[in-house]
Image (tube, helix red, strand yellow):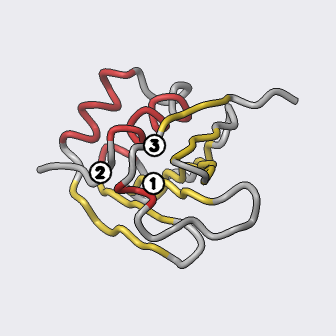
């Protein structure tokens, strides 16, 4: 099995899920995950994988706030864990839609904003 996440998305998952999984646990979970769905909404993306080890309890993870950039576009992230599914939501923090090819671009995490 192979997960549907891009390299930068795995980096985001590591950071946002650090309270739930060690890096090794997350990599094992992803290595055993089944790709479920990749959805471009016209605004952002939802990438979902399933693995029973994720558990049923709902967790929403968005801390620390992360910003990633590709060319002139920025993205932020939220992870949802529930019912054996892990979903990464990628959305534009400025309210302007991400381009459909955003996930295929070179994307770099550039900031962990401070409040």
Q: Judge whether 59 appears above or below 35 on screen.
A: above
Q: Residues within 10 Å of mark 3 (few under 14, many from 20)?
A: some
Which comes before the other along the chain, label 3 or label 2?
Answer: 2
Q: Quadrant of the C terminus?
A: top right
The location of residue 28, given as percent across then percent down, is: 24, 32
Image position of 79 (left or right of 24): right
Q: CA distance from mark 3 to mark 2?
A: 29 Å
Label 1 sits on residue: 56
Give the residue furthest to the right: 115
Q: Are marks 1 and 3 in contact (CB under 8 Å)?
A: no
Label 3 sits on residue: 107
Label 2 sits on residue: 52
The location of residue 49, given as percent across then percent down, is: 32, 57
The residue lying at 54 percent from left, 58 percent from top is: 89
The residue lying at 33 percent from left, 38 percent from top is: 7
Q: Residues within 10 Å of mark 2 (few under 14, many from 20)?
A: some
Q: Judge whether 4 appears above or below 61 on screen.
A: below
Image position of 48 (left or right of 27): right
The residue lying at 64 percent from left, 37 percent from top is: 66
The residue lying at 51 percent from left, 68 percent from top is: 99
SS class of the residue under badge 2?
A: helix
Along the viewing direction, whichever of 46 and 40 lies nearer the viewer = 40
Please tell me whether mark 3 or mark 2 is closer to you in this view. 3
Please tell me whether mark 1 or mark 3 is closer to you in this view. 3
The location of residue 15, given as percent across then percent down, is: 53, 29
Which comes before the other along the chain, label 1 or label 3?
Answer: 1
The location of residue 23, given as percent across then percent down, is: 37, 22
């Amino acid at each position: 099995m192979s997960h549907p996440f891009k390299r930068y998305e795995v980096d985001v998952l590591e950071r946002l899920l650090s309270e739930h999984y060690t890096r090794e646990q997350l990599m094992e979970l992803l290595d055993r995950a089944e790709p479920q769905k990749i959805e471009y909404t016209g605004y952002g993306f939802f990438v979902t994988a399933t693995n029973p080890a994720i558990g049923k309890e709902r967790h929403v993870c968005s801390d620390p706030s992360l910003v990633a950039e590709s060319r002139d576009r920025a993205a932020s992230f939220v992870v949802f864990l529930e019912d054996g599914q892990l979903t990464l939501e990628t959305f534009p923090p400025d309210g302007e839609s991400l381009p459909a090819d955003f996930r295929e671009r070179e994307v770099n995490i550039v900031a962990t904003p401070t409040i």
